[in-house]
Amino acid sequence: MLPRFCLGATALRRNILDLFGKSLELDDKGAAYSSEGVVHDIVFPRKGDTLTIPFDRHNLWIVDERLNFTELPVVGYTARWRQVGTARLDRLR
């Protein structure tokens, strides 16, 4: 059972990487790239955070495998971070 699951997971990741790669290419006319929103939604759905988006509905592993298991809110929720007095996690200093 486990080898079949691993094969399926690997094939799914390959398809997601292919889709992600296509989103970074120029369109058929060579005039424009996909919008940032399209690329963003492939990695992590906009207007969501790791508390509301289930593990199997995001692809943070594209950025870093360890992000699959993060429990921190993602970019876009800086107001919540300010309320609890923590540093801005979406900016490098």
Image: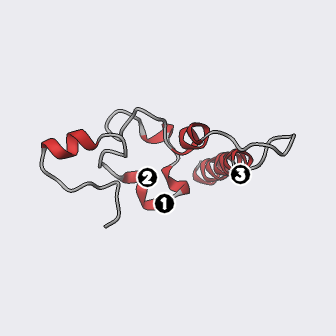
The image shows residue 67, relative to residue 37, as above or below, that is: below
Query: Label 1: few (<14), some or many (≥20) within 10 Å?
Result: few
The tally of labels here is 3
Compared across the picture, whether 48 is left or right of 72 comes to right
Alpha carbons under labels 3 and 2: distance apart: 20 Å
Q: Which colour scheme appears in the figure?
A: secondary structure
x and y percent of residue 56 in the render? 49, 40
Camera-nearest residue between 34 and 67: 34
Disc on the earlier residue, 1 or 3:
3
Please name the residue shown 40% across and 35% down the image. 53
Query: Circle 3 sits on which residue?
Result: 21
- Answer whether labels 2 and 1 touch (C-beta < 8 Å): yes
Q: CA distance from mark 2 to mark 1?
A: 6 Å
Residue drawn where x is 74% and y is 46% of the image:
22
Quadrant of the rendered image containing residue 79? top left
What amino acid does circle 1 point to? Glu
The image position of residue 54, as x and y in percent, is 41, 36
Residue toward you, 30 or 55: 30
Label 2 sits on what residue type?
Asn
Which amino acid, by three-letter code, is at mark 3?
A: Gly
The one nearer the camera, 2 or 29, is 29
Quadrant of the image occupied by residue 66: bottom left
Residue furthest bottom in the image: 93
Residue 65 is tagged as 1
Residue annotated with mark 2: 68
Residue 70 versus residue 77 in the image, above or below:
below
